[in-house]
């Protein structure tokens, strides 16, 4: 089998056994990136030198008989929303162009400690706001299955690089679907862990009560391997869970007999593409054939998911993004003409009149220049919804509905172990199709936001292809800390089917 097609599990085994060196593996993937990143634009930064020197160090340590970490030599791409001290971290925003964080995100330190080889930082929607990767300040990512289509977002670069074999594993973040939706549209496996399972320290904050980091891989078995490294308690993230991290990889090999999977009738309502519906129904049938039972469940408040999410997330974003003021770090506007003319008559008089002081002018102009249109839209929506006259009507009410959405899941999980359904209403859509219609873009998240609002876990994986050759995604959602079950159910499905093994036709 081709090196590029080896699973992460097989790659680390081959390197540990000495069948192949970490340098050979890194070179092969870096060459692939060099070849394909031009057209696909999945990476914002590639660290060829750093990756090769880490790989060489791993080979030297192996030769010397020194102990190696569990991911030794495994190339990993990291979403550009995670801080890396040795590479720029931009969140695909002009606001952070060239920004170099002083520290590594907790997940990044854990990956390094496990001897993974970080090959680069992946493209995304600016500040993780979007569902198509078209909100990146550095150009959209192309879907490897069809370059005229979006890879999904916001972790579009992470999904595309795994789908195109530019890296066997990528790290993404999911606030309302940003791991699962691009994984679904690119035909890979994406796990959004339970809120708090993976530390958010060093993840550039979008909506802190929803954000969660997770693995994007070709299979559930590979996701299980990566989770053993990235999950775990971190004193630097107050919301991080203290629960022991299970040995996910050793919990896969169990039959699905008796597993109860819920099916929500509303998931198959208006808006769902018929080919996607067919693929999803076939996956239910496959689970049934594997010994699971399928049950109707209700999530009565799921229909308020999009409205609730698009209040809670922008409110938290408007607060989180207040830190980009041009003073601390990031983009700073050049002083305006009004300021240079300042003659000591006081700020008010010296400024152009539009701003109350040169400082305020600097804040405003830095933010106006640094943020893209979708980020500005979210900040305005959030600021409005949090303003004193509207706080109760919008933000407080959204929090109450969020509670009901969460309760729906808790009730449903009384009678089923997992809930299955589509990830997204359609397969990958054409680039440009939704860019002028924010609401249409928001609706893409209708099946994914509930997981984040409830703080539970979800996984997506390919369950078929459209006639046009685009992947169709299936989503499983499970109760808090059900990652072992989510991974096991997906792994079993992947033992019985081969959708996840299909690769897009790209130059060798
Ligand atoms: N598409 C959603 C949004 O635009 C989800 C983004 C995410 O999960 N980061 O907010």
Image (cartoon, grey):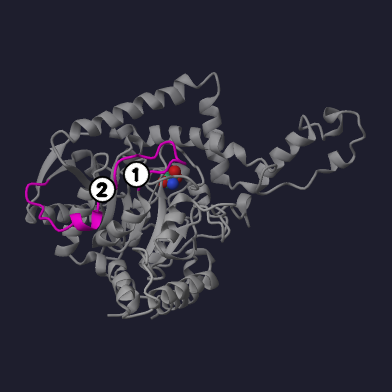
Q: Is residue 415 above or below residue 129?
A: above
Whether residue 151 is visible, yes or no, is: no
Who comes first in sequence, dot 2 or dot 1?
1
Q: On residue 483, which mark appears?
A: 2
Residue 90: name its quadrant: bottom right
Q: CA distance from mark 2 to mark 1?
A: 9 Å
State which region is magenta. 232-259
Q: Is residue 236 above or below residue 218?
A: above
Front in this rendered view, residue 6 or 57: 57
Q: Horizontally, is 76 left or right of 357 in the view?
A: left
Whether residue 180 is visible, yes or no, is: yes
Question: Does the beta carbon at disc 2 come under 8 Å from ligand 1?
Answer: no
Any magenta on residue 254?
A: yes
Label 1, secondary structure: give it: loop
Q: On residue 197, which mark appears?
A: 1
Q: Which residue is depicted at the point 39% across and 26% down?
A: 399
Any magenta on residue 322?
A: no
Label 2, secondary structure: give it: helix
- For the N terminus, the image quarter is bottom left
Q: Horizontally, is 284 left or right of 396 in the view?
A: left
Q: Is residue 362 above or below residue 179?
A: above
Cβ–Cβ under 8 Å for marks 2 and 1: yes
């Amino acid at each position: 089998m081709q090196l590029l097609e080896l699973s992460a599990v097989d790659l680390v085994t081959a390197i540990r056994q000495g069948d192949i060196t970490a340098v050979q593996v890194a070179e092969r993937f870096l060459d692939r990136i060099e070849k394909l990143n031009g057209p696909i634009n999945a990476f914002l930064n590639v660290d060829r030198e750093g990756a090769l020197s880490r790989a060489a160090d791993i080979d030297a340590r192996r030769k010397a008989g020194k102990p190696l970490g569990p991911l030794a030599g495994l190339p990993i791409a990291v979403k550009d929303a995670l801080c890396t001290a040795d590479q720029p971290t931009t969140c695909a925003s002009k606001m952070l162009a060239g920004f170099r964080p002083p520290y590594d995100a907790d997940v990044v330190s854990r990956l390094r400690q496990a001897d993974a080889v970080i090959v680069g930082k992946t493209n995304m929607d600016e500040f993780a706001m979007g569902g198509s990767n078209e909100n990146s300040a550095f150009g959209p990512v192309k879907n490897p299955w069809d370059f005229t289509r979006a890879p999904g977002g916001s972790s579009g670069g992470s999904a595309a690089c795994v789908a195109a074999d530019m890296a066997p594993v990528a790290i993404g973040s999911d606030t309302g679907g940003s791991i699962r939706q691009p994984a679904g549209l690119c035909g890979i496996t994406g796990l959004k862990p339970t809120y708090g399972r993976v530390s958010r320290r060093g993840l550039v904050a979008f909506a802190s009560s929803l954000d969660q980091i997770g693995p994007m891989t070709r299979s559930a078995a590979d996701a299980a391997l990566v989770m053993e490294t990235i999950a775990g308690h971190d004193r630097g993230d107050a919301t991080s869970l203290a629960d022991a991290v299970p040995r996910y990889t050793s919990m896969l090999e169990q039959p699905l007999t008796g597993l109860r999977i819920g099916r929500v009738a509303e998931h198959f309502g208006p808006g769902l593409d018929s080919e996607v519906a067919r693929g999803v129904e076939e996956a239910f049938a496959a689970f049934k054939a594997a010994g699971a039972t399928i049950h109707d469940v209700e999530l009565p408040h799921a229909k308020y998911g999009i409205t609730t999410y698009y209040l809670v997330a922008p409110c938290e974003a408007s607060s989180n993004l207040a830190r980009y003021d041009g003073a601390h770090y990031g983009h700073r506007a050049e002083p305006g003409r009004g300021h240079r003319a300042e003659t000591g008559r006081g700020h008010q008089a010296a400024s152009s009149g539009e701003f109350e002081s040169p400082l305020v002018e600097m804040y405003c102009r830095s933010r106006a220049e640094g943020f893209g249109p979708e980020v500005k839209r979210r900040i305005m929506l959030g600021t409005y919804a949090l303003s004193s006259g509207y706080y109760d009507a919008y933000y407080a009410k959204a929090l109450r509905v969020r509670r009901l959405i969460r309760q729906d899941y808790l009730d449903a999980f009384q009678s089923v172990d997992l809930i299955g359904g589509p990830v997204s209403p359609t397969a990958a859509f054409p680039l440009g199709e939704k860019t002028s219609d924010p609401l249409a873009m928001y609706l893409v998240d209708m099946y994914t936001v509930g997981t984040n609002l409830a703080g539970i876990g979800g996984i997506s994986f390919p369950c078929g292809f459209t006639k046009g050759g685009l992947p169709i995604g299936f989503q499983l959602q499970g109760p808090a800390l059900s990652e072992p079950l989510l991974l096991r159910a997906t792994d079993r499905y992947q033992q019985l089917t081969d959708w996840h093994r299909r690769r897009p036709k790209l130059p060798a």
